[in-house]
Amino acid sequence: GDAPMPGGFHMPFFGSSLNVGALVEPLTSQMADYLGVQSGLMIKQVARKSEAAAAGLKAVAVIIRVVPESVATVSDWDRALRSNQGKPVQVTILRDKKQQTLTLQVDSKRRRGALKLEGLAPAGDCPKMA
């Protein structure tokens, strides 16, 4: 499951099969009020050469929707990614108080890694990787 972080935030990297390269946390009610949104997820960090970076997601932007669903929690984000695995998805963000819609390619790192390994391994006598 999620690993607790200081301040009560969770990192969805442990035990999750999907990782698009964006570390997110829910907006506080004060931040949501300041930005003029009901809820959303603040992007804390984006990994270089990740799907999130390729889509144009950047730290400090706020994810407010994974079309057609609003996202308010890390669980909402994980669920939206899982339900769109292997597909491009429209993500609405708020950056500099302006809404933008970006296309994020949702992929499974584990699946893509397995495909690469299969391509390198000789067919036949190799044990299956879990």
Image (spheres, rainbow, N blue to C red):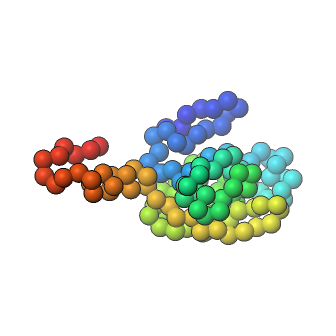
Of residues 29 and 85, the one nearer the viewer is 85
Position in image of residue 34 (x %, y %) = 87, 53
Position in image of residue 127 (x %, y %) = 19, 43
Name above or below for residue 129 compared with residue 49.
above
Position in image of residue 14 (x %, y %) = 49, 38
Q: Quadrant of the C terminus?
A: top left
Looking at this view, name the residue that lies furthest to the top: 6
At 75% from the left edge and 61% from the top edge, which residue is drawn? 94
At 71% from the left edge and 32% from the top edge, which residue is drawn? 7
Looking at this view, name the residue that lies furthest to the right: 34
Which quarter of the figure has residue 10?
top right
At 13% from the left edge and 52% from the top edge, which residue is drawn? 124
Position in image of residue 70 (x %, y %) = 65, 61
Q: In this view, does 81 lie to the left or right of 95?
A: left
Looking at this view, name the residue that lies furthest to the left: 125
Residue 69, visible in the rendered structure: no
Residue 127, visible in the rendered structure: yes
Q: Is residue 130 left or right of residue 124?
A: right
Q: In this view, does 122 lie to the left or right of 76?
A: left
Q: In this view, does 21 lie to the left or right of 71?
A: left
Query: How many tags in the picture?
Result: 0
At 17% from the left edge and 46% from the top edge, which residue is drawn? 126
Of residues 44 and 7, the one nearer the viewer is 44
Of residues 29 and 43, the one nearer the viewer is 43
Name above or below for residue 101 compared with residue 16.
below
